[in-house]
Image (cartoon, rainbow, N blue to C red):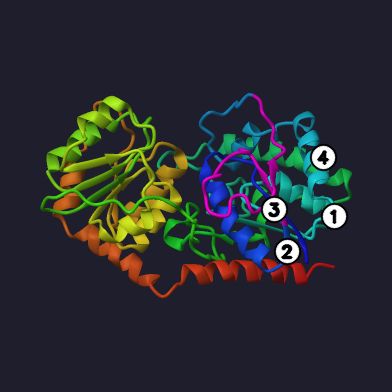
Amino acid sequence: MARIELAWELGAGTGHFSTLLPIGLELKARGHALRLHLREHDVGRDLPGAHDIPRQGAPIWVGPTPFPNPVNYGEILINFGYADRSQFEPLLAAWRERIAGADLVIANVAPAALLAARTLGVPALEISQGFHQPPPVFPSPALRDWEPAPLAKMEAADRQVLAVINAMLGAFGTAPLATLGELFIGRSMLLTYPELDIYPARGAAEYFGVVPTGEQGANPVWPAGSGPRVFAYLYNYYVGLPNLLAAIADLDVPALVFCRGIDPALKEKYRDPPIALSDAPMSVAQVLPRADLVICHASHQMTAQTLLAGKPLLLLPTQVEQMLIARRVERIGAGVAVAPVSPSSDFALPLAILAEGKGHAECARAFAARYARLDRAAVLAGIANRCEQRLASRP
């Protein structure tokens, strides 16, 4: 039996926990002892198996974010405590204390945990969708590939962070990093597909695809009506939400809309067919096969699940990672993105294009066909096998 530490340091939301949890449960079923270190301690407690692995809050740095719109991975790390040694040293020390004596560290967006493992000689793997795993180039690539790359800013950020990291690695007699992406060489397991990788110039990589998330929720009844069935998975804070719901209603087609915490006034306005609006969780896995068109905010998991079901997408990104994913979907012809958005944005045209056309649906089905033979449960077993191989190879 091995002692395995599961770590999440950067980012927000249930997605990080729902990525680590099924991997942890698979490894626990194989007899290993696990512990979760979570940036958000109470996240995902309603997921099946969420209480089967001990959890505690992760060591994180909380302070000012000098780059509200970071241009690359270096600026992201500066926002999270890698700006100078006075910030980073206690963060690294806390992670070293947590993982000392571990047999394996599995990180999901936890670079400080990976660096702590490096100083302790503990084997480690980074298992995530790739946004926080840049390729080993200097500087780490620009995130906004639709804008001119600010090369000087990118180089300055990476140099600043590398100086801080390498000073601490040197203090423990550990070899320095030449690039930030070097941290992931030999440790990267990408839970995505080449078409959705936000670093298209990554080169050779190990892609596992998405794994089951253990979601729960109702299998709702579609409202009556004719025309393509629309499924929308929306954020209650999306500024275009009122106009979007109006555009969906104007289509006059059967529509299921899930929006947790939606304004009661909006919920009351759309309480009758052809829209069925709910703030109670729905089982996405059961809804997607019966939908003809999906609307979401281009989160990686939801986007990938939709493409695997062969459904075209209207994508409404709210942050840079989602924007990058939306651009990848547009590139393969399987969807349309609306960004940036304002309270007055018009969604009627993109909805009409997707509802009436066939090209986007054909491209989505082509994506699904490419991965139709992949068993997602088998993917989970493959990830666990890879973790055990890393355990077997440790000194």
* Residue 116 x/y as whole percent: 78, 48
Q: Is residue 45 highlighted in magenta?
A: yes
* Mark 3 or mark 1: whose residue is earlier in sequence: 1
Q: CA distance from mark 4 to mark 1?
A: 14 Å
Residue at point 36% right, 49% down? 282
Q: CA distance from mark 2 to mark 4?
A: 25 Å
Q: Which residue is mark 3?
A: 183
Q: CA distance from mark 3 to mark 1?
A: 21 Å
Amino acid carrying label 3: it is: Leu
* Mark 2 or mark 1: whose residue is earlier in sequence: 2
Amino acid carrying label 1: it is: Gly
Q: CA distance from mark 3 to mark 2?
A: 26 Å
In the image: residue 248, left or right of residue 61: left
Nearer to me, 177 or 122: 122
Q: Which residue is mark 1?
A: 101
Point out the frontmost of discs 4 and 3. 4
Point out the frontmost of discs 2 and 4. 2
* Mark 4 or mark 3: whose residue is earlier in sequence: 4
Q: Which residue is mark 2?
A: 32
Point out the frontmost of discs 3 and 2. 2
Q: Which residue is mark 4?
A: 93
Q: CA distance from mark 4 to mark 3?
A: 18 Å
SS category of the residue bearing label 2: loop
Q: Residues within 10 Å of mark 2 (few under 14, many from 20)?
A: some
Quadrant in the picture for the N terminus: bottom right
